[in-house]
Amino acid sequence: KPVMCPLGSLVIGSKLDFDIHSPNCRMAFFGRILSSMDPKDLKQLQLVKMKQKVGVMDRVDKQEPSLIICKDMFKADSDIQSFIGLKILHESSGAEGVLEGSFGQDGRIKVRFKEEIQSLKLDSNKNIRG
């Protein structure tokens, strides 16, 4: 059923047929209204699924402190080519990096940050602790 919403409005669609005690999420979608459209022609509507991967920082490169080796984001046999160039976020500092490529054969990756992340706790071999 069509709904009238002003441009820029936040729209939240939910699935209300779940039991309220169900562990399932009832939110179906959300987003801002960017343009008007005819409800009979939904071909121009683009849906995007938000995805994220989580990994662990392993160590800092000895020659380049802004290059960090991360692990546990990909399996050893994963093809990471489609992820190269995507943004990586270090949650505790807010620093943004870019995935540069794989490192070794066990699923580790190289992430380049704009500058060295000062808040990291390192041991003498540049391995990240905690």
Image (tube, helix red, strand yellow):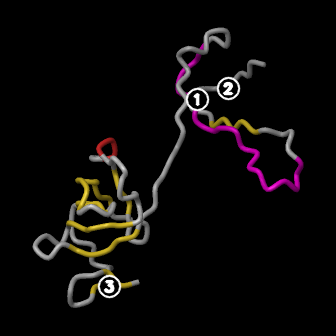
Q: Residues within 10 Å of mark 2 (few under 14, many from 20)?
A: few
Kind of residue indicated by mark 1 = Ile
Look at the image and tell me in which quarter the C terminus lies. Answer: bottom left
State whether residue 44 is above or below residue 70. above
Q: Is residue 20 magenta?
A: yes
Mark 2 in CB contact with mark 1 (< 8 angstroms): yes
* Residue 16, x across and y down, in percent: 84, 40
Dominant secondary-structure state across the stretch colored magenta: loop
Residue drawn at 21 percent across, 90 percent down: 124
For residue 57, which numbered disc appears in the image?
A: none
Question: Magenta segment range?
Answer: 19-37
- Mark 1 crowd level (few <14, some 14–19, many ≥20, 10 Å Cα): some
Disc nearer the start of the sequence (2/3)? 2
- Kindly identify the amino acid type of the residue bearing the numbered disc 3: Lys
115 or 24, which is in the foreground? 24
Q: Secondary structure at mark 3?
A: strand
**5 is higher (above) or lower (below) than 43:** below
Asked whether 31 or 82 is in front, the reply is 82
Give me the C-alpha separation between circle 2 and circle 1. Answer: 8 Å
- What amino acid is labelled 2 in the image? Cys
Q: Which residue is mark 2?
A: 5
Residue 58 drawn at (x, y percent):
32, 74
What residue is rendered at 29% in x and 58% in y? Answer: 97
Q: CA distance from mark 2 to mark 3?
A: 49 Å
Kindly indicate the quadrant of the structure image that contains residue 93. Answer: bottom left
Left or right: 1, with 19 as reference point: left
Residue to which mark 1 is pinned: 33
Task: Specify the quadrant that holds the N terminus.
Answer: top right
Which secondary structure lies at badge 1? loop
